[in-house]
Image (cartoon, helix red, strand yellow):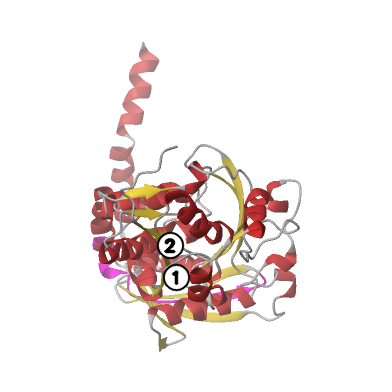
């Protein structure tokens, strides 16, 4: 393949993992151009230590480490909570929500550096290639996108490890432990290796954020989560900043064995894939938010919003975050959240969550109306006329078709 001389500078979405570690070297060899590494911090933690130095040693002329944790929470996680967005009713979108904020920050560096191309390390089998590239098309539409997994001769993790060894590139993966892991504030995901065999259970030593339910405390933990207009703002009465709040709930839920998910999901590219996830804060925040909505939203709005939750999750999962449809859905969802203010008390016990109290500022629940005791609001006789009118189509259909 002929390499274009127009590419003088490439910004690489860099994580320091196996793929992006060898990509820095490969880009220089393949395109004979300047390479800039850009790592966006969405809560990877220890993975960021020494990353800028490592990038420069493996081919980058410059390395950016950008802290985007707060924006990740406020601009991506909070909208997902308000939408109750779950892909296939189980996946809390930890990777799906992180990719657009990473792409957004990388696009800013591309503009600042006046780069000719942007590069990502997503494979040709996964969803991330779609998420990155659709975001880049929306944010920097005239910049060339390079996807090494669709160009190079490397076809497996083993090939990539061999490539790194030949060039003395240190990587955090070995042939003995080849499964892939992605960590951020919202989750840790695990794929590949032994997990590709659906008949085998995951390794308990694999987890970072949670203990097993068997090892969780023998006494329940109670946690109060407060919301304002659908956004979590306080834990146990203490107001917390966005990153601090997620971190606190990850610890609380993880200690109680909450947040592990083992699923076979349908990837956008058409195949089924097993993923094991840790999402402790996500699980209890969704649970609390749904409970608060149950007493704050009227029936029709709540039911219609529930039909949109899966669509919102699909949009995030399919890489369409920067789309008019997502913005339109946000407008509707934000309107529904005007009255979702209050506190929900949850009981956490060995992997289980039980709502124990709901206190909504704009509650639509009336104890006087709901009671089975005598009340002055509800007239039981009214139900007869309602049922007659509600059931009229059913009655007429039955009468006329029976006559025929």
Q: Is residue 279 magenta?
A: no
Callout 2–callout 1 Cβ contact below 8 Å: yes
Q: Quadrant of the N terminus?
A: top left
Q: For numbered disc 2, what is the local secondary structure?
A: helix
Which quadrant is home to the C terminus?
A: top left
Instruction: Determine which quarter of the picture holds residue 262.
Output: bottom right
Instruction: Check disc 1 and report its element: helix, strand or loop.
Output: loop
Q: Using the image as rendered, state which of residue 289 and residue 243 is in the foreground.
A: 243
Q: Is residue 20 visible?
A: yes
Give the percent coordinates (x, y) of residue 275.
Answer: 60, 53
Q: Position of residue 307 (x, y in %)?
A: 37, 48
User: Where does label 1 land, which residue?
Assistant: 42
Q: Is residue 315 visible?
A: no
Choose top left, top right, bottom left or bottom right for residue 191: bottom right
Which span is picked out in magenta?
A: 335-350
Q: Residue furthest bottom?
A: 238
Q: Residue at x 51, y 73 (%)?
A: 51
- Name the residue tied to disc 2: 98
Q: Residue, x 25% and y 49% (percent of image)?
A: 142
Q: Residues within 10 Å of mark 1 (few under 14, many from 20)?
A: many
| Residue 237: percent from left, percent from top | 42, 87
């Amino acid at each position: 393949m002929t390499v274009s001389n127009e590419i003088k500078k490439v910004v690489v979405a860099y994580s320091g993992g196996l793929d992006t570690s060898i990509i820095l070297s490969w880009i220089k060899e393949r395109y004979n151009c300047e390479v800039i590494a850009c790592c966006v911090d969405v809560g990877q933690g220890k993975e960021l230590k020494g990353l800028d130095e490592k990038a420069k040693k493996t081919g980058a002329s410059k390395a950016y480490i950008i802290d985007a944790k707060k924006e990740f929470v406020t601009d991506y996680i909070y909208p997902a909570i308000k939408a109750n967005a779950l892909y296939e009713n189980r996946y809390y979108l930890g990777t799906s929500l992180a990719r657009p904020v990473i792409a957004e920050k990388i696009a800013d560096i591309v503009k600042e550096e006046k780069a000719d191309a942007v590069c990502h390390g997503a494979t040709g089998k996964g969803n991330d290639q779609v998420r990155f590239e659709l975001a880049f098309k929306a944010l920097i539409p005239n910049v060339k996108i390079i996807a090494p997994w669709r160009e190079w001769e490397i076809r497996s993790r083993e090939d990539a490890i061999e490539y790194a060894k030949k060039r003395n590139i240190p990587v955090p993966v070995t042939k003995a432990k080849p499964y892939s892991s992605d960590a951020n504030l919202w989750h840790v995901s695990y794929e590949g290796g032994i997990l590709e065999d659906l008949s085998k259970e995951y390794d308990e030593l694999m987890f970072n954020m949670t203990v097993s339910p068997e090892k969780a405390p023998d006494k329940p933990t109670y946690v109060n989560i407060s919301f304002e207009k659908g956004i979590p703002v306080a834990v146990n009465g203490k107001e917390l900043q966005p990153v601090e709040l997620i971190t606190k709930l990850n610890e609380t839920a993880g200690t109680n064995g909450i947040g592990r998910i083992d699923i076979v999901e349908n990837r956008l590219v058409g195949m089924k894939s097993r993923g094991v996830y840790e999402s402790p804060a996500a699980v209890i925040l969704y649970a609390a938010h749904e409970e608060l909505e149950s007493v704050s939203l009227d029936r029709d709005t709540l039911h219609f919003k529930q039909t949109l939750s899966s669509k919102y999750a699909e949009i995030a999962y399919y890489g369409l975050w920067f789309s008019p449809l997502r913005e339109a859905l946000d407008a509707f969802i934000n309107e529904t959240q005007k009255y979702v203010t209050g506190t929900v008390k949850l009981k956490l016990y060995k992997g289980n969550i039980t709502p124990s109290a709901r206190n909504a500022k704009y509650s639509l629940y009336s104890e006087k109306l709901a009671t089975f005791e005598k009340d002055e609001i509800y007239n039981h006789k009214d139900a007869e006329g309602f049922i007659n009118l509600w059931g009229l189509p059913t009655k007429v259909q039955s009468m006329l078709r029976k006559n025929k």
